[in-house]
Each structure stands twice: as structure tokens, then as C-alpha cells.
């Protein structure tokens, strides 16, 4: 974002126009100047009025006050009907200027009907036929509507007026009945801004139970109020409303969301603990529980490890200082961390990988993958070997990788494993083609040679001779295989 | 006078000139730059994040300076009470002398494309049930009708479409004097809800423009590209002075070459570029044949155009190279393979290996969400077990707080459990011919070329509406969410069109909730079909791609503390 801005700034800065002064002879401007001066001098008075609930109009200014009427006049001179329509015009003339290279194919074509490009022929013809005679006549409203403030507008007129961005007083709607009619009118107009305005008025002037009850049967208005409360951060009101409506899962999620605003980890942990009992869906409940448990663990691990690190006793922490704290990291990242710093710990320890695996029911695949990456990063090849070795009940050992050996090879390679180590696992890749590919790519010569031998592919084997070093053991091996008369070559 | 702008470029040249604006700044937190002016106007979208920045600006203003500067705020497109309330709570509302609105609903992006650029429209409509953006859409359509005549026929599919049509009819009724005497340009208006077709934006777009957007993100017709490929190729520099600033280019049909290739499948772009290269070098060769003064003069007069063509070619060749590096990568291929399997209905009902691998390797979360949502949509919802599995993996790998995002996706219908155990997608796919096996990327004969096999559902609906009409697909329409409808707006007899033989109809397609570049390409393809009979103009609430779209639905998480 900031880069975008810096870039655009250059563009905007480069523009230089004559300064705007209020000494201009222009009538409209001097009018503006006057009203502005008046508003300025009145601002203090206006601000004090904020607490007066009954008298606040939808723009937040007290209706009927001097500043209000001045504002009305001011906006009458700047953004009256004509001003508004000309803003439309302004809009469309700036449209035309949008693409810098003037072209018949550009935006102006659609808006001014000057298109002469063949593919748009019919449209452009239609446009030149009609021309653009008038701007937005449908949006033009009778002048009468812009007359001075009148106090007896119907709910419908009030809503319409507000839709046009006009100041309107709502406090004359006193009875519940009137207020609800007003709300229904606002909803029928679909303009969220007006609906919100009316809702704020209702929220201030109605008792909660009544407001909630009425909103329950007005879903659209209800959604707007929920959105408003959420954006304004009126959490308590929101939760009361959701509880009233029995939308328990939403209450739960909404409350859980709050934890994001808590920076202090201890407080966050306490908060999450409180979330566990909330009425989430069954599946989500277990996730929230896990979230709490994880943070609890992280706090313990963090305290311990920070101590270890500053004490400087542990070689591991000295050699590989921690890049960041483990607090608030995802589970898999935490597992990686624990495989990196606490691999050999007994299962009873909170920071041990096996403990994490058990507590959070981490699937085998995920565990092996993470542990492998961590141990490979430390170049602990013995651990890698042990991780992939399983013993059966007869005591025989066997290599097994729930993630597939090609993935093992990938991870090891990324951590610059020596060829001897890599080779061992490349050999175990089941699919012959993948094995050959990986072996060739990572120069595991023995595996390539043996695979070609097993495939009885003399041509490929012969060709491979040039890939190995002259006079090396590998070359020797190729020669001896090629001269082996017992092999029945397929080519 | 100085103006402040929130991001999102609206061309204000005209406004500037009329009002003699001294300086323009982009909105950012901190102290306002010094400018010797009396008035400062904030020109902003009504968004709370922006209000915070403005608050910061106002609070840091030096009260002692003289002359004191006055603040004004201009909301685009509408004043927002929510924002004003927010400013009031921050204690700065009183600092603004004027609070007005600049009613800019639809912003033209190209000769056939209008957008409201309201990125939160989809979220507001489908998650928050806030229909304000629909109100603006309706208002924008009224303005369009005021300019280009009443649109006699309105078709629509989806709840939001129904709302917009209702509002238009209501607005028309409320201003009875509004019957205008403009000969209608548009024959038909087609309103389409984004949630009628949740599938299309999730798939990777494969047109040239679509890929630029997928990979680098087009913002208000501008794209920023890594500079390496755009370094001036001079000898002896030895790569020392490589530019470090991203290269910024404007993309629209004003550029002849771009107009030609933007909507092509990426695989067909290379051949066009090499053909163009030959033509241009041939044109430059012409100078050797220019013998007479007159010939030389003619050559010279063409030079500027030729040079522009050459630099345009150089730019697009560089962009195509950048994109090719990505499209030929293994991961792009694997990702596309999975997408295409899902869209053609293969293995949509079980946990996908590739997605699991991507999670294990911690690929960007948005990529994972796009794929999982795509699978869900192509299976009319996932089996509970599969859904739970994905959820668990995502939360464990990316953090439990994303439970909020997953919930949003579920609410929007993008990620959900299958209900009733029925998968409607195969029927929809077959009836609407959404998957085409024999796709011709070079010389397409069907819109499916934009996704190399998948024909965007939304555009198929538009195509079938034009011919043979929606009556033929009633059954499928019922399977898609929301009502479908037709409305007619009466025209005075004098304005009724007498269609010449062979004359094209013009349809305005309005995508409520966003449209992708690939869909636009598909509609342009239909416009250009010889026997198509219909031309399309496109309007939308926002130009989107899968990534920006999913992002708009994600819960805003606090930045990590480190």
C-alpha cells in the first residue's frame, strides 16, 4: 500500500495550480466565505450539544440551530440541485480524460459517442444518432423539494431527503409507531446509510428490549445494526443483541474474535480460556480448545527458552539463536520449533514433540514432515534415519515414509544433505521414473547405475558414462556391469 | 486549496482545473505536508480505516500555524453516517467545515467496461446483508439510462439482481417526470449475482490480461512489474545499473497491441508478438528504400507511431516472458491440473493430495482457500469428513484464528458441507456445457478458451439468454441460487427500435459482486463473433480475481507482533 502511495504522490505533487483565494469576486465563493466564518465562530457552541440526544439530526448537528441553518444555506449554494447535476457532468468529462493516449477506442467513446472503431460501429452509430442531449434528467427533482426546512415531512419524504444527503430531523418521530414506519421506509429504500441513520436514532431513543423485539422481525435492519455495532466496536451491545436473538454460534464467534485485540499474552490466554465454554459448533469447540491449549504451552515454552537463551548455557540456542518468539505461532510452526530445539525431550515435557503430537492429535504425515524438516535443517542425519525407520515385531527394521520418499529427498536436498545421505533415500523411491529423475538431478550416480542395470538398459547406462568422473569408482562400476555377461540386456 | 485522496485513482484533472487546486497528496498517516493553502479537502471512500488516517492528520495539524488551514471532507460516492459517527467519536468531526459527497457511481475503465470499484460489495451483500452497494448500483444504472435511454428489457438472476431491478423500477416510479426522450442505446440489461457463479473467479484466468492480474495484480488499469526485464539493453553496462523501482505500466485498449492481445489465451500471445515484431522491423527497413525527399519525409512522419509501436511491443514481450516463467513452472502446472480436474468433475468428493501437499509446504493461505473452495463449489459442498479434514489442516498450519475466515467463506456459500447428499454440479456442467474437451486456444470457437477448457458459467448464462433464451435451461436455473426474472420498461412509441436486418443488439451485463478479466474477455469474444448478433457492455461493482476476492472475505487479523 505504502509503495503505491509513494508512487502516486509523485504524480499528485507534480501538479501545480494557481492558489485558491477567498478574495475572489465570485459570488458563490464569497457566500461560502461568509457562511464559513459564521460556522467557525459557532463551532464551539455546536460541539457542546452532542449529548442532547433528542435534538441531534442524522448528520450529528443539532437541528434548527444557527449552524444548522447556515450549513443548509451553504450547501444550498455549493451543492444544490444544479451543483449536484453539474458534478455529474464533471464526472463524465473527467471520464473522457482518463486514458492519456487519446484514442477512438477509449472511454470517451462510450460517454460522448465519438467512437469510430469498426467493432463498436453499431454502438457508436446509435450514440451519434441520439447524442447526449441532457444529463441525468431522471435524477432531476422538483425545486420545491429544496425549499426550506419544513417540520411535517412524512416518513417517506424524510427518508427520500436523507437519501439525497440532506440534513433531516428525526426527533419529531416520537411514538413507537412513527419510528417503526420510518424504519420500514428506510429499509424499503435500500440505502444502508439512511437505514443506519434511522437505527442510530432508534438505538438512542428506544429501550433495548423493544428495539431488539422489533428488529427481530426486520431482518434487513437487523443486519445493518449488527454491522454497525461490529464496526464501531460496541461489543457488549452486540452480544446482548445476538443473545436475545438466540444466535448462539454467532455470539461465540463474535466473542472469540475479540482475542485478536488483546496484545498481552497472559490476558489473551485467560480470554481464550473463557471462550472454551461458548456455544460453538461441536467441531469448532475442539479447535478453540486447541487454540487455548496451544497458547498455554507456548507461554510455558517461551518463558523457559528465553531463560535458556539468555543464560547462554545451551549450545543449541547459542549456535542457532531464535529468530522470533514462539508466542501466537500456528501449531505446525510450534511443532517445528519443538523438533528443532527440544527433539530429545521425554514425552512428559510440555515442549517435547511427542507430547505436542499426542495432545493435538497431529497426523503422522504432518508430524514426519515437520520433524524431518527440522532435523534436516540441523543436519542431524542420524535422527532423520531413525525417524524413517520402523521395527516390526520380529525385530527387523524397515524404512517407511508416510509422505513418500520423493518428498523426503526433496526436503533433505533443500537442506543440502550430502550425496551419501540423499542417495540412501533416492534408492527407496518406488516409482522407477521418479527415482531415475531424482537420482540424475542430484547426481546420485550409484542409484542411476543400479537402476539402469535393473532395467537392463545398456544404451542408457553406456550413455551415462560421460556423466561420471573419469577414473572414478562409478566409472569402474559401469564398466564392470557392462562387461557382465550374465546380464541379458534388453537393447 | 489542497486535496487529499484515498487510494483508488479517479481522474480529477477537470475538477482540479475548475477549482484551482494547488496540490494533491495521497492520504497517509502523520502530519500533513506543508502547503501554503487555506483549505484542505479530503477526498475519500467512506471507509473506517481511512477515517483513522484522516483523524491522525487532523490531530497532528499544527494549531499554532497561521494562517490556520480549514478542513473539508468529500465522500465518494456517498456520505456515510457510520464514518461521520466514527470521526465524531475520535473528536474530530467538528474540524470539518464541509462534509459533502461526490456522487460517482460507475467509473469507466475502458470503452466497454464500467466499474463501481467497491471492493467490499460482495462481502457486504452476502455476509453482512448490507445492500447499500446495490442501491448505488441502481443509482448508477439510472444515471446510465438518463444518458443512454431507458433500457426496454431487464433480465436477472439472483437475489441481488432482483433487488436492483426492484429499486430501478421504484426509482423510476418515484420520479414520474423522468421519462426521457433519448433513443435507447441498450436493448437489454442483464443483472447477474456473483453468487450465481461462485466457481469462475476461483479458477486461474488464462487470458493474457487475466494472467497479468492473477500474477501481478492490475490496480485501476495500472500494473507494477519487476524491473529486471525492462532494463535498457545497452552494451558495456554489465548489469550494474539495474533499475530497482518496479516498472509501472498502464493497460487499456488505447494501446493498439494490447487491445489485440489482452483477451487472447496466453498460449496464443507469443505468435502474435513475433508476427508484430516482423512487421515492425520490416517497417523500419523501409528507410533503405526511401529514395526521394518525399519518401523520406513520409517515412519520418511515420516514425513516432512506429517508435510507439516498438516500445509497446518491447513491453509486452517482456511481460509475456515474465508470465511464461511462471506458467511453465511445475507448481503452476500442478495447480492448474487440479483446478481442471475439479471443474471437469474428477475426484471432487475426496481429500486432494495436491492441496494437502500445499498445506504441508505452507503455500500462501489464499491459494489453499481458492482450491478448497473450488472443490467445494464443484461438488455442491464437501462431505462433512472431507471438510473437517481440510479445516483442521488449515487451522493447525496457519493458525486457529482463521476459523473466522473459514466461517465467512461458509456463510458466503464458498465452503460448505454438502446438504441433502446431492451434487448438482454435474448436471449444471453438462447442460450449460461448462467443460469443453476440445478447446482451441489459438483460434477459439467457444468462450471456454479463456480458461483453457472451462466456459465461465456467468458468461454462458448471458450467451444462452441471447440465444435461444433462458426458457431452454429452466431446470438448471432453478438449481442456481436466487430467482430469475424478466421485466419490461415501456418506451414511448417514437423511441421503439425498428431493427435493421443484421443489426446487432446491445446488452449491458451488470455483475453484482465483481467480475474477472477472463469473463470480460469471454463477453468480448461473443461481441466479436460474426454471427453473434449481440454486443456486450460490461458493468460491475468491482474488478476481481480469485485472490482479491477471497481476500475481501477474510477476517482482518491483527498484524503479528513481530
Image (tube, coloured by chain):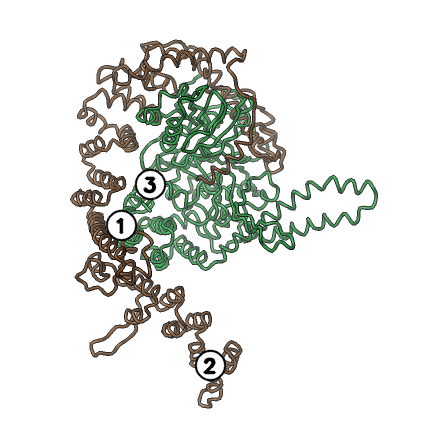
Chain colours: A brown, B green
Q: Is residue B235 left or right of residue B127?
A: right
Q: Is residue A187 visible?
A: no
Which chain does the numbered disc 1 sit on? A
- Nearer the observer: mark 3 or 1; the answer is 1
Camera-nearest residue between A146 and A393 = A393
Residue shown at 22%/78% (left/top)? A395
In this picture, is B527 found above or below B32?
below
Residue position for label 2: A474
Q: Position of residue A377 (x, y in %)?
A: 35, 63
Q: Do labels 3 and 2 touch, CB within 8 Å?
A: no
- Nearer the observer: mark 3 or 2; the answer is 2
| Number of other residues with Cα within 10 Å of mark 1, as a class: few under 14, some 14 to 19, many 20 or more | some
Residue B556 has which mark?
A: 3
Q: Do labels 3 and 1 touch, CB within 8 Å?
A: no
Camera-nearest residue between B212 and A137 = B212
Work out whether mark 2 precedes mark 1 in sequence or the reverse, and give the earlier one: 1
Camera-nearest residue between B242 and B87 = B242
> Residue B330's image quarter?
bottom left
Q: CA distance from mark 3 to mark 1?
A: 19 Å
Instruction: Classify mark 1: helix, strand or loop.
Output: loop
Instruction: Classify mark 2: helix, strand or loop.
Output: helix
Residue position for label 1: A327
Q: Is residue A329 visible?
A: yes
Residue B400 has which mark?
A: none
Q: Is residue A232 left or right of residue B302?
A: left
- Nearer the observer: mark 2 or 1; the answer is 1
Amino acid at each position: 500500500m505504502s509503495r503505491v502511495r509513494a508512487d502516486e504522490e509523485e504524480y499528485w505533487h507534480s501538479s501545480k495550480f494557481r492558489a485558491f483565494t477567498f478574495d475572489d469576486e465570485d459570488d458563490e465563493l464569497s457566500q461560502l466565505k461568509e457562511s464559513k466564518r459564521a460556522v467557525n465562530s459557532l463551532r464551539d457552541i455546536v460541539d457542546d450539544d452532542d449529548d442532547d440526544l433528542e435534538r441531534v439530526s442524522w448528520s450529528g448537528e443539532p437541528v434548527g440551530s444557527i449552524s444548522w441553518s447556515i450549513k443548509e444555506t451553504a450547501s444550498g449554494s455549493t451543492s444544490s440541485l444544479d451543483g449536484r447535476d453539474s458534478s455529474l457532468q464533471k464526472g463524465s468529462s473527467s471520464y473522457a480524460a482518463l486514458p492519456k493516449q487519446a484514442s477512438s477506442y477509449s472511454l470517451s467513446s462510450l460517454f460522448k459517442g465519438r467512437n469510430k472503431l469498426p467493432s463498436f460501429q453499431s454502438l457508436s452509430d446509435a450514440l451519434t444518432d441520439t447524442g447526449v442531449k441532457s444529463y441525468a434528467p431522471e435524477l432531476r427533482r422538483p425545486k420545491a423539494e429544496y425549499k426550506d426546512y419544513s417540520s411535517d415531512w412524512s416518513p417517506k419524504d424524510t427518508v427520500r431527503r436523507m437519501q439525497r444527503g440532506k440534513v433531516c430531523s428525526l426527533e419529531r418521530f416520537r411514538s413507537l409507531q412513527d419510528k417503526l414506519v420510518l424504519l420500514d421506509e428506510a429499509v424499503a429504500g435500500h440505502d444502508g446509510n439512511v437505514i443506519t441513520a434511522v437505527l442510530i436514532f432508534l438505538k438512542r431513543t428506544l429501550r433495548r428490549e423493544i428495539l431488539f423485539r422489533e428488529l427481530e422481525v426486520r431482518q434487513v435492519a437487523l443486519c445493518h445494526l449488527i454491522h454497525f455495532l461490529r464496526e464501531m466496536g460496541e461489543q457488549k451491545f452486540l452480544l446482548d443483541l445476538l443473545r436475545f436473538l438466540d444466535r448462539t454460534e454467532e455470539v461465540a464467534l463474535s466473542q472469540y474474535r475479540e482475542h485478536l485485540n488483546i496484545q498481552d499474552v497472559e490476558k489473551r490466554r485467560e480470554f481464550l480460556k473463557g471462550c472454551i465454554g461458548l456455544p460453538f459448533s461441536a467441531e469448532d469447540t475442539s479447535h478453540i480448545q486447541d487454540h487455548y491449549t496451544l497458547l498455554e504451552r507456548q507461554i510455558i515454552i517461551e518463558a523457559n527458552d528465553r531463560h535458556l537463551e539468555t543464560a547462554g548455557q545451551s549450545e543449541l540456542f547459542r549456535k542457532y539463536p531464535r529468530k522470533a518468539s514462539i508466542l501466537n505461532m500456528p501449531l505446525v510452526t510450534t511443532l517445528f520449533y519443538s523438533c528443532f530445539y527440544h527433539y530429545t525431550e521425554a514425552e512428559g515435557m510440555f515442549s517435547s514433540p511427542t507430547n505436542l503430537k499426542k495432545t493435538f492429535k497431529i497426523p503422522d504425515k504432518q508430524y514426519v514432515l515437520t520433524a524431518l524438516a527440522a532435523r534436516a535443517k540441523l543436519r542431524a542425519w542420524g535422527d532423520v534415519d531413525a525417524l524413517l525407520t520402523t521395527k516390526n515385531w520380529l525385530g527387523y527394521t524397515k524404512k517407511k515414509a508416510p509422505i513418500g520418499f520423493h518428498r523426503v529427498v526433496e526436503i533433505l536436498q533443500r537442506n543440502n544433505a550430502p550425496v551419501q545421505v540423499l542417495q540412501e533415500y533416492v534408492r527407496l523411491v518406488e516409482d522407477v521414473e521418479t527415482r531415475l529423475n531424482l537420482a540424475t538431478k542430484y547426481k546420485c550416480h550409484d542409484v542411476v547405475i543400479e537402476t539402469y542395470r535393473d532395467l537392463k538398459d545398456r544404451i542408457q547406462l553406456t550413455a551415462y558414462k560421460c556423466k561420471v568422473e573419469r577414473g572414478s569408482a562409478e566409472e569402474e562400476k559401469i564398466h564392470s556391469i557392462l562387461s557382465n555377461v550374465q546380464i541379458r540386456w534388453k537393447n | 486549496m489542497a486535496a487529499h485522496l484515498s487510494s483508488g485513482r479517479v481522474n480529477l484533472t477537470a475538477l482540479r482545473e475548475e477549482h484551482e487546486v494547488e496540490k494533491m497528496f495521497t492520504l497517509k498517516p502523520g502530519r500533513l505536508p506543508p502547503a501554503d493553502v487555506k483549505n484542505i479537502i479530503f477526498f475519500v471512500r467512506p471507509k473506517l480505516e481511512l477515517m483513522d488516517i484522516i483523524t491522525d492528520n487532523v490531530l497532528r495539524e499544527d494549531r499554532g500555524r497561521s494562517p490556520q488551514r480549514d478542513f473539508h471532507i468529500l465522500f465518494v460516492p456517498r456520505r456515510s453516517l457510520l464514518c461521520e459517527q466514527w470521526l465524531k467519536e475520535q473528536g474530530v468531526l467538528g474540524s470539518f467545515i464541509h462534509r459533502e459527497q461526490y456522487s460517482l457511481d460507475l467509473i469507466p475503465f475502458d470503452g466497454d467496461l464500467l466499474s463501481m470499484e467497491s471492493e467490499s460489495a460482495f462481502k457486504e451483500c452476502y455476509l453482512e446483508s448490507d445492500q447499500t452497494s446495490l442501491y448505488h448500483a441502481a443509482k448508477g444504472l439510472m444515471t446510465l439510462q438518463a444518458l443512454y435511454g431507458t433500457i426496454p428489457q431487464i433480465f436477472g438472476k439472483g437475489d441481488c439482481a432482483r433487488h436492483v431491478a426492484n429499486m430501478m423500477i421504484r426509482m423510476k416510479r418515484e420520479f414520474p417526470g423522468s421519462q426521457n426522450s433519448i433513443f435507447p442505446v441498450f436493448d437489454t440489461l442483464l443483472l447477474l449475482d456473483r453468487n450465481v457463479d461462485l466457481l469462475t473467479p476461483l479458477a486461474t484466468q488464462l487470458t493474457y490480461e487475466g494472467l497479468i492480474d492473477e500474477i501481478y495484480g492490475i490496480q485501476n488499469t495500472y500494473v507494477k512489474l519487476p524491473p529486471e526485464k525492462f532494463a535498457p539493453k545497452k552494451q558495456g553496462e554489465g548489469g550494474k545499473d539495474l533499475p530497482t523501482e518496479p516498472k509501472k505500466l498502464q493497460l487499456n485498449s488505447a494501446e493498439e497491441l494490447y487491445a489485440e492481445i489482452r483477451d487472447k489465451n496466453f498460449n496464443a500471445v507469443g505468435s502474435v508478438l513475433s508476427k508484430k515484431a516482423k512487421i515492425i522491423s520490416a517497417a523500419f527497413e523501409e528507410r533503405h528504400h526511401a529514395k526521394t525527399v518525399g519518401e523520406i519525409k513520409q517515412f519520418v512522419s511515420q516514425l513516432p507511431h512506429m517508435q510507439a509501436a516498438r516500445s509497446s511491443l518491447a513491453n509486452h514481450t517482456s511481460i509475456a516472458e515474465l508470465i511464461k516463467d511462471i506458467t511453465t513452472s511445475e507448481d503452476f502446472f500442478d495447480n492448474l491440473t487440479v483446478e481442471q480436474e475439479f471443474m471437469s468433475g474428477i475426484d471432487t468428493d475426496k481429500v486432494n493430495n495436491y492441496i494437502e501437499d500445499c498445506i504441508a509446504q505452507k503455500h500462501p493461505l489464499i491459494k489453499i482457500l481458492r482450491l478448497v473452495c473450488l472443490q467445494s463449489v464443484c461438488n455442491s459442498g464437501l462431505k462433512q469428513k472431507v471438510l473437517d479434514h481440510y479445516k483442521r489442516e488449515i487451522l493447525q498450519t496457519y493458525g486457529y484464528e482463521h476459523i473466522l475466515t473459514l466461517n465467512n467463506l461458509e456463510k458466503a456459500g464458498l465452503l460448505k458441507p454438502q446438504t441433502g447428499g446431492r451434487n448438482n454440479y454435474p448436471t449444471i456442467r453438462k447442460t450449460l456445457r461448462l467443460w469443453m474437451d476440445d478447446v482451441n486456444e489459438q483460434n477459439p470457437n467457444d468462450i471456454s478458451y479463456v480458461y483453457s477448457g472451462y466456459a465461465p458459467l456467468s458468461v454462458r448464462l448471458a450467451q444462452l439468454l441471447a440465444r435461444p433464451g433462458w426458457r431452454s435451461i429452466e431446470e438448471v436455473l432453478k438449481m442456481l441460487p436466487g430467482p430469475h426474472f424478466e421485466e419490461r420498461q415501456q418506451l414511448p412509441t417514437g423511441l421503439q427500435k425498428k431493427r435493421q436486418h443484421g443489426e446487432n443488439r446491445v446488452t449491458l451485463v451488470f455483475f453484482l459482486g465483481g467480475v474477472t478479466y477472463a469473463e470480460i474477455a469471454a463477453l468480448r469474444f461473443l461481441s466479436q463473433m460474426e454471427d453473434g448478433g449481440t454486443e456486450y457492455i460490461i458493468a460491475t461493482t468491482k474488478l476481481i480475481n480469485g485472490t482479491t476476492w477471497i481476500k475481501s472475505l477474510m477476517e482482518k487479523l491483527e498484524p503479528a507482533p513481530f
